[in-house]
Image (cartoon, grey):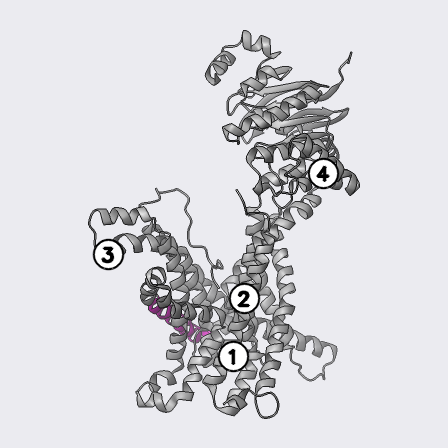
């Protein structure tokens, strides 16, 4: 049965690998988008301005309460409608066009990641030791210097475990884009199933690939956490 | 040393938290080489007063002058905010909980201020930091992180960090209160040697021995006011107020 | 059509979908809630060799997308149709609702087991010793001391898990179960009216909010003897990321 997974015309190895490449690409492109949104959300909810705080709270609360697949459809269909409206306004005879599923995936997954990351970063920020900030003030550092030299380097250490979890969740959530016809690992598996009529074999294979990616991520994250905590918690 | 110059002057400092008035008008002057101990029971406002001097706490009203640079505060608003960072860099501060930056080694903690705030070249700051850590007896601990040091060692790093800014005066906020009893001595010894060097120091403390032996002036705060003030020998020998008498009999 | 008209015309379907979402979530959480205490005990007490399959199961569930788990069960079962027919199980696997429920229950069981394990491990040894000292039997100690304590600790995290399960239940729409998401996609494909998605979002948020309130009420009861009225307490936080 191994010829099923062979590379080339005979087997499905190359198709599935191509799907895997899309999945990995999607996750890697989404990460910076999500982190950026997460920082924005964290700053907003820590800001001194009430409307900004409300905005941060609203974004993180609503996004975290919605099913990811709903967010994906809202972005995909909503952006699609807007796109077509724009196109028709530009050129009334334009044929209807589809919004790129990849872009929709990046935006939707990034928004979800950003909402959770906002909470992680806010928590990390608040768990920083206030005394160290005061010590910075006491020697005359500016707020900016305090942020850059004292808070940011330690923020990373506090936020890393939470962000690591979010990365793994996001990696798994990429499977959702198969539903909006992006040719990721999940969808290529479905294609293979359609031809070979061996659904269990192929979905199990897909599961094993996701599993391997998550376990690998966990190993790398544990390594990163060890590095981030270097010198901090050993001894005494 | 004929005419000691004034380093720091605080005039009529008031501070309220909501309705609670913690400081009810305190004035204090520190001249060159002064070592002023501020005593008082908990809740007397002594730490708050100290923190008002470098604006970690913004007073409700009053005036602070450091080396001719003055900041006037009215209604909780400092008149010239820009000078605050300036004043802070001229006053060193040593905290009760040390407040070392845990992600930096002892040496990096000491170098941070000179390099980042005073823009001194790295090599120069490093030489100075090494000398200062040697000065507080930590030459063999320079590359350790705070978590690898004992409380007493951390506090000595914090003192070196304050010294690295070459401050006009150093504020100590209960520097030995968070230490295990057997570690208090090593920190007091460093402080004593700083006093002997002629450093200007303002110390909020519970260490009666230090207040008595080392300081040139003692200020006793009670309920947000200065209840008694003077040279330690005189004050401890014959307390003028009942509250101070009770205070020293209790801590003894 | 404006958003109000959409709601006016399609509310029976959306309500129907909401009931389906609640049914899936409730049954899934319940089944997992019945199975997980036993598994959690195994995770705490059994020999490492006996734990190995359980750890593998939890790791697999955590490391794979729920969508993939759902497909593995729903479509994957087709590969074994003759055998399943022979055992009389095919009618079960043919039904998308059953498969979705099975997938969600299996998924939630893994997470709930880990949460409960943490709760059990946090029971102070001295409380167990005190129970032994007055001659309680093993099962009685579990019932009277260990589990009450473990549930109190684990309660907020279990609440978060149920909310995550509720969100995950939207995936059932992909295998043609008509929950909120399924109804919404159906209505959208007919009307191309975007506002139906916003109504769906509102329904999900309302379910979550109502659930959080209920869960906190229950928590207050569970820990009545710890907190005097009016003291601040740690409580179920909506949507807090606690797993994976």
Q: Is residue A97 left or right of residue C201?
A: right
Residue C90 position in % (x across, y down)? 35, 87
Whole-angstrom CA distance, mark 1 to mark 3, is: 43 Å
Give a yes or no on whether discs 1 and 2 share a subunit: yes
Which label number is shown at residue A236? none
Whole-angstrom CA distance, mark 3 to mark 4, is: 61 Å
- Are dots 2 and 3 in contact, CB under 8 Å? no
Q: Nearer the viewer, mark 1 or mark 3?
A: 3
Q: Residue at x 34, y 54 (%)?
A: C150
Q: Residue at x 78, y 11 (%)?
A: B2
Question: Which type of secondary structure does the marked residue at label 2 adopt?
Answer: helix
Residue A119 position in % (x across, y down)? 55, 55
Residue position for label 4: B113
Residue A14 position in % (x across, y down)? 61, 85
| Nearer to us in this view, B78 or B176 | B176
Residue A16, magenta (yes or no): no
Q: Residue at x 42, y 65 (%)?
A: C111
Q: Which stretch did the figure color magenta?
A: C8-32
Whole-angstrom CA distance, mark 2 to mark 3, is: 39 Å
Question: Which type of secondary structure does the marked residue at label 1 adopt?
Answer: helix
Residue position for label 2: A168
Q: Quadrant of residue C169?
A: bottom left
Q: Is residue A133 left or right of residue A175?
A: right
Residue position for label 1: A206
- The residue marked by circle 1 belongs to what chain? A
- The residue marked by circle 3 belongs to what chain? C
Give a yes or no on whether discs 2 and 3 share a subunit: no
- The residue marked by circle 4 belongs to what chain? B
Question: Which type of secondary structure does the marked residue at label 3 adopt?
Answer: helix
Residue position for label 3: C138
- Are dots 3 and 4 in contact, CB under 8 Å? no
């Amino acid at each position: 049965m191994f010829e099923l997974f062979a590379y080339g015309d005979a087997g499905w190895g190359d198709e599935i690998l191509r799907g895997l490449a899309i999945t990995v690409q999607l996750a890697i492109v989404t990460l910076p988008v999500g982190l950026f949104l997460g920082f924005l959300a964290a700053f907003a909810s820590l800001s001194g301005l009430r409307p900004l705080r409300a905005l941060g709270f609203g974004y993180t609360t609503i996004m975290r309460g919605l099913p990811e697949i709903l967010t994906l459809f809202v972005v995909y269909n909503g952006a699609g409608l807007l796109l077509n409206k724009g196109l028709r306004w530009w050129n009334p005879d334009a044929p209807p066009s589809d919004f790129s599923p990849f872009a929709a995936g990046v935006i939707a997954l990034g928004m979800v990641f950003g909402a959770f990351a906002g909470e992680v970063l806010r928590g990390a920020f608040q768990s920083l030791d206030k005394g160290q900030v005061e010590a910075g003030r006491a020697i005359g550092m500016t707020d900016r210097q305090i942020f850059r030299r004292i808070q940011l380097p330690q923020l990373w250490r506090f936020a890393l475990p939470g962000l690591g979890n979010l990365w793994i969740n996001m990696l798994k959530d990429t499977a959702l884009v198969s539903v909006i016809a992006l040719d990721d690992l999940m969808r290529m598996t479905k294609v293979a199933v359609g031809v070979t009529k061996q659904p269990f074999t192929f979905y199990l294979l897909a599961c094993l690939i996701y599993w391997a990616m998550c376990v690998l991520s966990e190993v790398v994250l544990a390594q990163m956490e060890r590095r981030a905590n270097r010198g901090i918690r050993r001894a005494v | 040393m004929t005419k000691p110059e004034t380093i720091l002057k605080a005039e009529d400092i008031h501070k309220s938290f909501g309705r609670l008035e913690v400081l009810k008008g305190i004035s204090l002057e520190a001249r060159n080489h002064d070592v002023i101990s501020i005593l008082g029971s908990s809740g007397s406002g002594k730490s708050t007063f100290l923190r008002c001097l470098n604006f970690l706490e913004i007073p409700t009203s009053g005036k602070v002058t450091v080396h001719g640079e003055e900041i006037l505060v009215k209604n909780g608003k400092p008149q010239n905010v820009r000078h605050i960072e300036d004043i802070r860099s001229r006053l060193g501060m040593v905290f009760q909980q040390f407040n070392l930056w845990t992600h930096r080694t002892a040496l990096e903690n000491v170098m941070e201020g000179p390099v980042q705030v005073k823009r001194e070249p790295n090599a120069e700051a490093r030489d100075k930091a090494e000398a200062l850590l040697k000065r507080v007896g930590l030459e063999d601990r320079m590359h350790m992180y705070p978590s690898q040091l004992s409380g007493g060692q951390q506090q000595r790093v914090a003192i070196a960090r304050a010294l690295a800014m070459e401050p006009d005066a150093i504020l100590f906020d209960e520097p030995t209160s968070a230490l295990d009893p057997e570690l208090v001595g090593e920190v007091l010894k460093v402080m004593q040697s700083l006093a002997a060097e002629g450093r200007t120091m303002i110390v909020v403390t519970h260490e009666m021995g230090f207040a008595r032996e080392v300081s040139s002036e003692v200020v006793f705060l009670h309920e947000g006011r200065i209840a008694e003030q003077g040279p330690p020998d005189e004050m401890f020998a014959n307390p003028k107020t009942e509250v101070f008498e009770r205070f020293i009999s209790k801590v003894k | 059509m404006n958003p109000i008209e959409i709601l006016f015309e399609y509310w029976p379907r959306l309500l129907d979908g909401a009931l389906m979402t609640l049914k899936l979530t409730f049954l899934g959480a319940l089944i997992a809630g019945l199975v997980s205490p036993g598994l959690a005990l195994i995770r705490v007490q059994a020999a490492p060799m006996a734990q190995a399959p359980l750890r593998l199961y939890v790791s697999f569930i955590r490391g794979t997308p729920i969508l993939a788990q759902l497909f593995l069960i729903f479509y994957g079962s087709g590969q074994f149709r003759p055998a399943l027919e022979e055992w009389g199980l095919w009618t079960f696997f043919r039904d998308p609702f059953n498969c979705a429920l099975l997938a969600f229950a299996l998924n939630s069981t893994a997470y709930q087991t880990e949460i409960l394990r943490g709760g059990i491990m946090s029971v102070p040894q001295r409380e167990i010793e005190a129970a032994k000292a007055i001659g309680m039997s093993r099962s009685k100690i579990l019932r009277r001391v260990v589990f009450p304590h473990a549930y109190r600790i684990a309660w907020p995290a279990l609440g978060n898990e149920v909310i995550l399960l509720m969100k995950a239940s939207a995936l059932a729409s992909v295998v043609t179960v008509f929950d909120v998401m399924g109804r919404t996609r159906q209505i959208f494909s007919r009307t191309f009216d975007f506002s139906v998605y916003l109504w769906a979002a509102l329904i999900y948020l309302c379910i979550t909010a109502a659930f959080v309130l209920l869960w906190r009420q229950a928590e207050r009861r569970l820990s009545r003897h710890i907190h005097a009225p009016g003291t601040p307490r740690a409580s179920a936080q909506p949507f807090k990321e606690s797993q994976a």
